[in-house]
Image: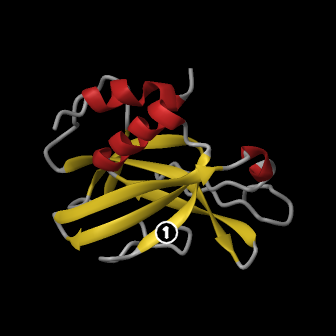
């Protein structure tokens, strides 16, 4: 069973970053189009403490400072080629993506639009058509685990 197949269970346990050019950043009114590649990586994050904790299935929130987050590789077209960035968001977006996965699958281009700022922010996700996922075979993916700082050299693929 893939992680996407377990997202409904993950969300039931919840109840109600890091700066880098590898992350998708939204501004009010901004949008991005791309394709989700692979499974999400779930974790807890405290914005006050700037601390990450691993998510364990069935675990309750580790403290009032912590919020549920997920990361997933998100491929965007960049001057005729594909570039993989990291999409990081919370449980509301994960729930929306899970609903899309259950209904139509995630083998499609998605447009994600942001409306609002701060705690009054809404993300709208629109499916833009199916994609042959084989075109992404061999595309280098990002390390999604915020608790590790492993970088991969693009020349030899060996962590340093």
Q: Which quadrant holds residue 141?
A: bottom right
Q: Nearer the viewer, residue 73 or 150?
A: 73
Q: Nearer the viewer, residue 153 or 137?
A: 137
Residue at 68% x, 67% y is 83
Q: Position of residue 95 (x, y in %)?
A: 34, 40
Residue at 16% x, 38% y is 16
Q: Position of residue 159 (x, y in %)?
A: 73, 56
Q: Nearer the viewer, residue 132 or 121?
A: 132
93 w.r.t. 25: above or below:
above
Q: Quadrant of the C terminus?
A: bottom right
Q: Position of 106 compared to 54: left or right?
A: right
Residue at 36% x, 27% y is 8
Q: Position of residue 94 (x, y in %)?
A: 37, 44
Residue at the extreme right of the image, as rendered: 156
Q: Nearer the viewer, residue 3 or 77?
A: 77
**Res 16 visible:** yes
Q: Position of residue 48 (x, y in %)?
A: 20, 61
Q: Quadrant of the N terminus?
A: top right
**Tally of numbered discs:** 1
For the rendered model, the colour scheme is: secondary structure
Q: Position of 39 compared to 45: left or right?
A: right
Q: Which quadrant holds residue 122?
A: bottom left
Label 1 secondary element:
strand
**Res 50 visible:** no
Residue at 33% x, 68% y is 114
Would you name the residue on which mark 1 appears?
Answer: 32
63 w.r.t. 159: above or below:
above
Pointer 1 local density, CA inside 10 Å: few below 14, some 14–19, many at least 20: some
154 w.r.t. 127: above or below:
below
């Amino acid at each position: 069973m893939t992680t996407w197949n377990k997202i409904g269970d993950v969300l039931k346990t919840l109840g109600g970053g890091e700066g880098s050019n590898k992350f998708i950043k939204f501004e009010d009114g901004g949008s991005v189009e791309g394709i989700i590649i692979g499974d999400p990586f779930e974790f807890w994050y405290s914005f006050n403490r700037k601390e990450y904790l691993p998510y364990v299935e069935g675990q309750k929130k580790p403290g009032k400072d912590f919020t549920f987050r997920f990361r997933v590789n998100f491929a965007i077209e960049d001057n005729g080629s594909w570039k993989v960035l990291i999409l990081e968001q919370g449980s509301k977006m994960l729930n929306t993506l899970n609903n899309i996965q259950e209904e139509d699958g995630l083998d499609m281009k998605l447009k994600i639009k942001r409306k609002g700022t701060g705690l009054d922010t809404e993300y709208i996700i629109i499916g833009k058509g199916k994609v042959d996922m084989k075109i992404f075979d061999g595309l280098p993916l990002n390390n999604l685990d915020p608790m590790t700082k492993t970088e991969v050299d693009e020349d030899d693929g060996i962590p340093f």
